[in-house]
Image: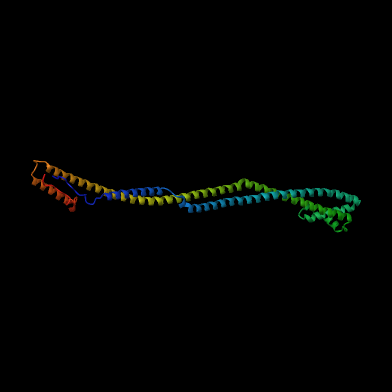
Amino acid sequence: MDNGLLIGNAPGFRSDDAVKVVTEQNRRTQDGKQNQKQGGSVYAGDLRGNQDRVSAKFAYAQKNAVKRLLEQFKSDLAIDEEMQAGSKRAEELALGATDAFKELNDLDDQRAELMKQYEIDPNGQEQKDLELMQKANEANKNPFDPSLQLTDEEKERYAKLPQPTEYQEAMLVLDKREEQLRNTIQKNRQDIAVENATVEATKKALLKVHPMVEAKKDSEKMMQNALKEQAYDLLQEGVDKVNEDMAENKEEMAEAKAEALEEKIEREKMKAEEAKEEISRQELQESVFAASEPGTMSDQQLYDNLQNEIKNLIQDQIVLDVDLKGLRVDKQV
């Protein structure tokens, strides 16, 4: 007596389909991990072009900083050279004034020598006429000095003077030379004062402004700004790259999650179908086993119950019509 029950596979489910699902899920999981790994990194190769651009800007800033220092150095050097030149001119003027003083002192000896040479009496008429000539020359040079002007008597006497003697001409030449020397000494003193004042004023101005120190600060500031700009550019580029990768990664992760959710739903459906099929199969087996126990119900009732169970399976689409051909139920217990 054959009590065996043969039931076909559940509709729509095959073992090779399960293998494909698992394989596809593994592939997507690996791809998702790879995308996450790549999305969280910034590759230097992607930033190379921007690094070159930033390096060029930094080099340009360095060039400007060095140029600023060199320009200030040249300016300071020119100022130093000018101060040295001023000091040197002052020294030369001082030497010229010293020489003029020496020559001026020698004029008195030359006058004494001329008087001795021409045997001039200090109280004689020739000497008095010379002194009147000398006073008239001083009055002409200083017309606004009343103390140097000739009296009416001296003017009348000066008008009647004869031509200068050889002695008087020699002495008048010495007077002109004395005038030149005194002018040289006076001018040199003025020029020395100007040169020294200019040098001192320049030194004081440099002590106040510190141009080279300021130029160095400017250069350092240029370099600091260039470094900040370089760091900012590289950081911004990295942030943009990370944001871009994160956006792509989020999109890929969202797609992966959607696919995983869809696959999970499919798996849950498959599990639900399998559970439902298992429940139906167990119920059918229980009915068969119950039918095999003696004294429970008649053979006709058992057969009718079994046919009803089979119809219910067909209606729930768990068993196909073609699978019913493989179902053999032995009426005879």
Most extreme residue toward the right is 119
Which residue is more in the foreground, 141 or 53? 53
Residue 270 seen anywhere in this rendered image of the structure: yes
Q: Nearer the viewer, residue 261 or 314?
A: 314
Residue 147, compared with residue 297, is above or below; it is: below
* Residue 144: percent from left, percent from top: 76, 54
Q: Is residue 257 visible?
A: no
Q: Residue at x 79, y 51 (%)?
A: 181
Q: Residue at x 81, y 53 (%)?
A: 177
Image-based side of 200 in relation to 132, left or right: left
Residue 110 is left or right of residue 229, and the answer is right
- Residue closer to the observer: 120 or 32: 32
Coloring scheme of the render?
rainbow
- Which residue is found at the position 12% from the left and 42% from the top? 292
Whether residue 113 sits left or right of residue 291 in the image: it is right
Q: Position of residue 65 (x, y in %)?
A: 57, 50
Q: Quadrant of the C terminus?
A: top left
Image quadrant in which the N terminus is located: top left
Residue 328: x %, y % from top left: 15, 49
Residue 99, x across and y down, in percent: 79, 49
The count of marks equals: 0
